[in-house]
Amino acid sequence: MKSVFAIIIILIAQIANAELDDKTKLALNNAHNVVTKDFKDPASAIFRNEYLVENVGENGAIGVCGQVNGKNSYGGYVGFKSYVVFGNTGLINKSKIDADLIMLMCDKTNKNYKIIEINE
């Protein structure tokens, strides 16, 4: 009986998280396109740890922060790199300066941003 109850709870949780709202889907699709536009094999990109950052200032811009892993020319994955995308501008962590900017823009403790977690 306990196992049936547990299965029902799991199914309800999955249904609740099955559909992302349109704003989130649009932001994620845009971010994935921006980040992978120069990849050798964009379809093989793997994304993780993604969340939305909404600027609480005047413009209310929505960005996406996360990590991406892509394939190199030899077909091997290069390892996860942090990224941030606002609008059609994206930045992937390729240097110390990139890392500092991404850390600043994706800081979950920044009071200028509203963090929206994504449950996929």
Image (tube, grey):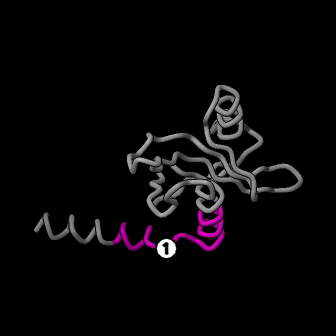
Q: Is residue 29 magenta?
A: yes
Establish if 34 lies above or below 97.
Answer: below
Report the residue that reaches farthest toward the right. 58
Tell me which residue sits at (28%, 66%) in the image: 10
- On the image, the x and y values in percent for residue 95 come to 64, 29
Report the residue that reaches farthest toward the top. 96
| Horizontal arrangement in the rendering, residue 57 relative to residue 30 (left or right) | right
Q: Place residue 60 in its image quadrant.
A: bottom right
Helix, strand or loop at disc 1? loop
| Horizontal arrangement in the rendering, residue 51 relative to residue 43 (left or right) | right
Front residue (pair 36, 117): 36
Front residue (pair 88, 61): 88
In the image, the segment drawn in magenta is 12-30
Q: Place residue 27 in its image quadrant.
A: bottom right
Tell me which residue sits at (45%, 50%) in the image: 71
- On the image, the x and y values in percent for residue 37 come to 63, 58
- On the image, the x and y values in percent for residue 35 come to 62, 54
Q: Amino acid at mark 1?
A: Glu
Tell me which residue sits at (13%, 64%) in the image: 2
Disc 1 crowd, CA 10 A, few/some/many (<14, 14-19, 20+): few
| Horizontal arrangement in the rendering, residue 24 relative to residue 7 (left or right) | right
Establish if 64 lies above or below 110.
Answer: below
Q: Quadrant of the C terminus?
A: bottom left
Establish if 78 lies above or below 24.
Answer: above
Q: Which residue is mark 1?
A: 19
